[in-house]
Structures are given as C-alpha cells and as structure tokens.
Image: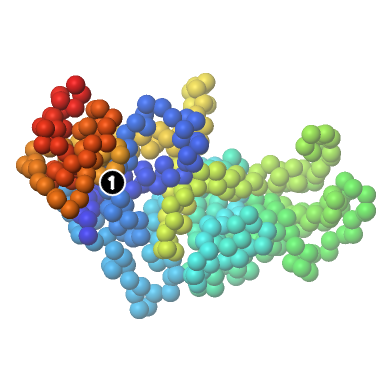
Amino acid sequence: MPVVHKKSYTAHEAISLMESISISDQESTSSSDDEDSDEETAHRNAFIVLQPPLERPDAVTDEDSDYEDAGDADREMPADNTDKFFKVRPLFQILNQKLEVFQNCENISVDESMVPYFGFHGAKQYMKGKPHKFGFKVWVATSPTGVPLFCEPYAGASTDMPDYGMKKSSDIVAHIITRLGLGAGHKVYADNYFMSPALLKWCTEKNIGLTGTLRKNRLRDVPYPPVEAAVGSYKSVVDTENNIIYTAWQDRKCVLAASNCFSCEPLRTVTVGRGQTKEKSKPDLIVEYNANMGGVDLLDFWLSVYRPRIRSRKWYWPLFTWVLGVLLVSAWKLWSNHSAAEKNENKMSFLSYIRKVNYGIRQGFPEKEHHHQPRDLLTGRIDNRFSDNAHLIDEDKDKQFVCRSCRELEGKKSRTQFFCTICRVGLHPRCFRRYHDPVGMTS
C-alpha cells in the first residue's frame, strides 16, 4: 500500500479538475502554465488509494505524517444509522458552510438537480424528463444567475427532514427557507412539484415572497375560473385573507400560477422566440417567475460542461465530483462578479478558471527530479548503457546477435555471438567500449 500524505489530497483534487477538461480543450488552450505534470505531485497508485474513500484529511495535522490506508473502514455504517448518505454527509455540511458567503441574495430559486449514477444504490432515482434520467437527486437553492446557495441530497422516504405539516414536496422548500434563514424581503421561486396553497400560506406568515406554478390536483379548495381559449388571456382569483393571487394564463396550454408578492397587472411585453422573435404580453407574476426560476438549470449546465471523467465503482464518487464542480462554479461566479464590480475588462471563461485553479493547486508542491530510466528507442527496454553498473561482455555460442553499435553508427547488420550482460544487446568485442561511451556513440 503506498504511503499517503495529507497534501496528496490536494494533488488528488488537481488531477480530478484536469480530468474534467477534454483533451481538445487542453490542446487548444495550452500554455506554459501547464508544463508541469500531475505525475510530479501524485503517484498513480496513490491516486487510486485516495479516490475511493471520502475520509477527512483534516484528521492529519502534520504534513509529514503518513498513514498507510485511506480506506473506508472508519466510516462503516452504525447499527442505528438510517442515513443512506452517511459517508458524504460531512462533505455536504462543509459545502453548505462554504456557500454561506452567497446567502445574501434576494431572489432564490428552488429545484432539483440530478447527479448521474448508473450503479446500484438505495437512494438512486429515476426522472423521465431529465437529461440524466438515473442518478442521485439533490435539492438545490440558487440565485437567478446560477450561484449555488444550499444543497441537500434526497434519500427517499428515509430523508431526515422536519415535518412542517404540508406535503413532503412543500416541506422541502420550507426546510430550505429555514436553513437559509430567509425573512422579510426575500422572494422564493419554485415549480409545480413544490408549490401548494399550504406553502403559500406558510410563506405569507413568515413575510417571505413565494411565486411559482401549480398543479390542478392541488387546487381543490381554490375555485379557479375557466380561462378563455384565446392565447394570452388570463383570469385570476384573490385570497384576500392570505394576500395570495391564483392565476390561470392561457399560453400554448393553460398555465396555473400563484404568488403572494406579485400580481397579474400590469401586463408586461416581452420578446420571445429564437431567430424570428415576436412580442407577447404576459402577467407580471409570470414574467418574474421566468426571469428568476432558471438558476438551478444554469448550475446544471455549467456542471455538465466540464464534468470529471474519472470513473469509480464507489457510489459516492459521483457525489464527490459533483460537490467539487459546485465549488468551482460558485468560486468562478464570485470571481466574475468581483471583476465586474472592479470594471475589469479581462473576462475569464469557466475553462480558463478551471485551468488557473488547477495550476494554483499544483504550485504548492516542490518540483521533483524524475528518476525514470531512459528507454531504448528501438526495443522500448530500459537503456542502461551509460549507467554506473558493471557492464560485462559474455558469449553465447548457441545464438547470433546483431551488433547494436555497428547498426546505429554504420548501418550494418553485422552478426556476433557476444553480448552485454547488463544491456542485453549484441556487441562485438571491438565495439563494446565504444557503445558504452557517450562520446564514442556520437562520433
């Protein structure tokens, strides 16, 4: 088992980042910053040892201290444990702690994100309408620009979540609002999977704005008026007691929406379509919902652009790389916002930012001398001709060898029964000294 140092975890992260960049991207944006190889910072066997476990590197306080096995023996499931994500739970706790710096956002969208996984696990989900239909489901709260604010993995019915007296899907939004500490002045956006009249009333009591679409089977107590067949028409019902407006707007099909902070009027004209654009009038709450709801989709897009390609049999490896990608996206968004505030015209793409982060990680490691022995260009064997080993000449009367020195210098295939015991190549006695002399082989 190779010896693993604490700083090897940093090298492990750097290799994972570089594996998220395709070969064509590396070649098209190659620079002098990438001349150093990851082989200088982490041995292949050490990387394999580091990849399966998600142990806490902070447990190793001394950089020079070693521990033989980074296996997951210390992370066995306790007898009374019901958390299916117990191995990655500390990882998500650290992630949410790091994302607290972004939690001063006014508009917040809540949606689910899929982490691709095709193995066997009790928490694996199937979602028909997603690009990756199989994987782990993670509840995510983001800003409208895709900056992550909170992440919580979903483990099915065994998910440890407080009961707010609503539907399970609505309890998710209430749990995220509570964890983020939202209050008056914040506006939350959710789709029809999470929305319900009970959630709207709960947010109204907390003075928190909530806007989203609704499903018809959740509106049994709300008398929705029939909407006209004309595209663009709408009708609404106002719950004056709870200050909630329910709207039915006819687009290509009927859209049911509700809000406790926006109204239908004034109607706003927006430009829709691709290529041949046209103007369309929409209710105010529909426009606000479309403008602020796509944050999680933007986050999924950036995570899918340069997803790490390293594969593992461990179920928690996709979650580890997903968390690594979320941290990268949030850091890149923070850098971009800071550059925009400083009026810095030198914009950096997400690919360039990944490369800069990778290069910055590897700068913390001293350069190591390569001890790779040179290999012969013809046979691929290790070339020891100029080493300090005791080269001896021997004779094999049963075999015929081609003198290597005569072939390289004179281009002749001269036969001989003598060979070097170290280099294992045929040599004439007269060519023995010349072959092992660097000056003689170039003359």
Taking 349 as reference, is 73 above or below it?
A: below
Its colouring scheme is rainbow
The kind of secondary structure element at disc 1 is: loop
Residue positioned most to the bottom: 79
Task: Classify residue 246 by image quadrant.
Answer: bottom right
Q: Which residue is mark 1?
A: 42
Residue positioned most to the right: 229
Return the residue nearer the eye: 46 or 352: 46
Taking 263 as reference, is 93 above or below it?
A: below
Return the residue nearer the eye: 402 or 295: 402
Taking 356 as reference, is 264 above or below it?
A: below
User: Does residue 230 appear in this view?
Assistant: yes
Return the residue nearer the eye: 429 or 225: 429
Q: Residue at x 19, y 21 (%)?
A: 443
Residue 285: x, y in percent? 74, 46
Q: Residue at x 40, y 47 (%)?
A: 16
Q: Residue at x 32, y 41 (%)?
A: 38
User: Does residue 332 appear in this view?
Assistant: no
Return the residue nearer the eye: 327 or 23: 23
Task: Classify residue 199 by image quadrant.
Answer: bottom right
Q: Residue at x 30, y 50 (%)?
A: 44
For the N terminus, the image quarter is bottom left
Amino acid at the residue labelled 1: Ala
